[in-house]
Amino acid sequence: MELPDYLIRFYAKDEQLLMENTEDSQREFILELYSKSKVTVEDLQRNHTPEEVRELCVRTKLRVNMTYLNSVWDAKKLLNKTNCLDNLSESSINRELVKCVHSKMVQTYTDEDVANANRVAKSELKRANNIRLDRWKRQQDSFFQRPATPEFSSWDESDTDENQQDHPMDSVLYIKKEPKW
């Protein structure tokens, strides 16, 4: 399986813009960094378990960029540059924004543009979630490992008998509170 067409087109445009804005001496380094940040087929094919999905829901904050692909926001930025919205009431500002969008003073985004942007964002979010889950797993694994202190290094397995309990640190668990919905 290979990457979907929308991702291939997106990365081709993105790489072209990147190469136009970098110096010749830094292109190799920038391309190497850029290639590591791309979404891979493995990222897209990874399935999350219900426990992983729950952990992502609990530990990740929801962020929404309301200005991305928003014609009204583009109109507001344009009118703010020319100071057209100064000293106007809220209803007058809204009327001006509607006029600006309807008169095509700003670019309106087609449904196809929005759908492609959403697919790319979804793919990049999946990659970010995969990275988060892997990082949390590594942190959890390192948390449960015994620290290498002199107290533990002098402890020998042969010193224990069958009835003796393990070290008290072995019973420590990481307990996470349930969210209050």
Image: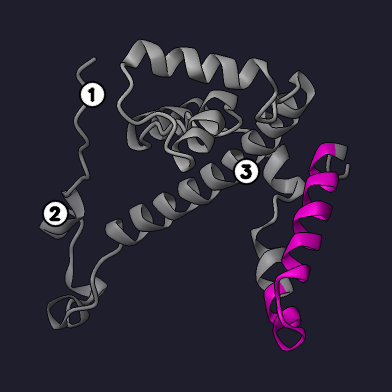
Q: Is residue 121 magenta?
A: no
Q: Which residue is mark 3?
A: 124
* Nearest to the observer: residue 20 or residue 119: 20
Marker disc for residue 165: 2
> Which amino acid lies under the numbered mark 3 shown in the image of this protein?
Glu
Q: Which residue is mark 1?
A: 179
23 versus 179 height, above or below = below
Dot 1 alpha-carbon crowd within 10 angstroms: few under 14, some 14 to 19, many 20 or more: few
Nearest to viewer (mark 1 / mark 2): 1
Looking at the image, residue 127 sits to the left or right of residue 88; the answer is right
Dot 2 alpha-carbon crowd within 10 angstroms: few under 14, some 14 to 19, many 20 or more: few
SS at mark 2 in the image: loop
> Which numbered disc, 1 or 3, marks the residue that appears first in the sequence?
3
- Can you tell which quarter of the image residue 61 is in? top left
SS at mark 1 in the image: loop
> Which amino acid lies under the numbered mark 2 shown in the image of this protein?
Gln
> Which numbered disc, 2 or 3, marks the residue that appears first in the sequence?
3
In percent of the image, x 52 and y 51: which residue is there? 131
- Can you tell which quarter of the image residue 69 is in? top right
Q: Quadrant of the C terminus?
A: top left
Q: What is the spatial separation of the Cα atoms under label 1 and label 2, in whole angstroms?
A: 34 Å
116 versus 20 height, above or below = above
Looking at the image, residue 116 sits to the left or right of residue 4; the answer is left
Residue span colored magenta: 6-30
Q: Is residue 27 magenta?
A: yes
Q: Position of residue 151 (x, y in %)?
A: 12, 78
Nearest to viewer (mark 1 / mark 3): 3
Q: Quadrant of the N terminus?
A: top right
Q: What colour scheme does the image use?
A: one colour
> Which amino acid lies under the numbered mark 1 shown in the image of this protein?
Pro
